[in-house]
Image (spheres, rainbow, N blue to C red):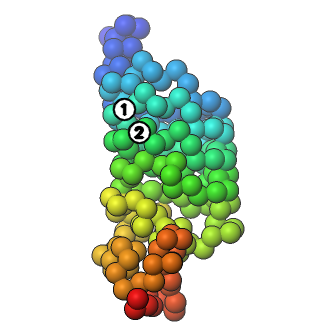
Amino acid sequence: MIPSEKDKISFLLKNPIFLLNDLKISKIDNLNIYKDNMKELYLQRNGISTIENLDFLENLEVLSLGNNYITKIQNLTQLKKLEILDLSNNLIDTLEHKNLPLSLHYLYLYDNPFFNTLTEYDVRYSCINYFPKLINIDSLEVTFRERHICSGSKINKKYINKGECMYIADHYRYINT
């Protein structure tokens, strides 16, 4: 039996996972009718350049925007339940933590232009310092030791305030304050 249009719409409205990868979407729009049920939104490999029109997705837990043309991190702080965010392989030239929700557990940022001015460790440790619930960054688990160092224990406060931690020859250097 072929489902009717009403059945298709009913299914879409109840489905919490939206796979919209590889559809040549250039603008995030027209998702407001799914706001109550949408928990996961996958928009990888499209033509999206701006993060917009997501503020009403209060139940969104996963957002995948990898492999697009996004240039700026914006319009995400209102997504209070967002735990997984993929912004990898975009055109983001500045890492602005304040524009990301504090609820993040998994964050994917690799292959963005800001890595030309920041080291992998600058990005990693500034994220660990800023996001208290972070478990994984760019597919690498946040270790207890990293969390401890970035919490400010036995490390010079001026580095933490800049969002930096020091990494030397595969060992952490503790600086007694």
Q: Amino acid at mark 1?
A: Glu
Q: Is residue 167 above or below residue 88?
A: below
Report the residue at 62% width, 30% height from top.
Answer: 27
Q: Is residue 75 above or below residue 120?
A: above
Report the residue at 46% width, 42% height from top.
Answer: 77
From the image, tell me which residue sits under label 2: 79
Nearer to the camera, 131 or 33: 131
Residue 15 as seen in the image, left or right of residue 129: left
Locate the C terminus and report the quarter of the image it occupies: bottom left
Nearer to the camera, 173 or 37: 173
> Horizontal and vertical percent for residue 8?
38, 14
Residue 95 as seen in the image, left or right of residue 15: right
From the image, tell me which residue sits under label 1: 58
The residue tagged with tag 2: helix, strand or loop? Answer: loop
Q: Amino acid at mark 2?
A: Leu
> Horizontal and vertical percent for residue 114?
65, 62
The residue tagged with tag 1: helix, strand or loop? Answer: loop
Picture quadrant where residue 139 is located? bottom left
Report the residue at 67% width, 52% height from top.
Answer: 91
User: Disc 2 vs disc 1: Cβ atoms closer than 8 Å?
Assistant: yes
Q: Is residue 71 above or below residue 78?
A: below
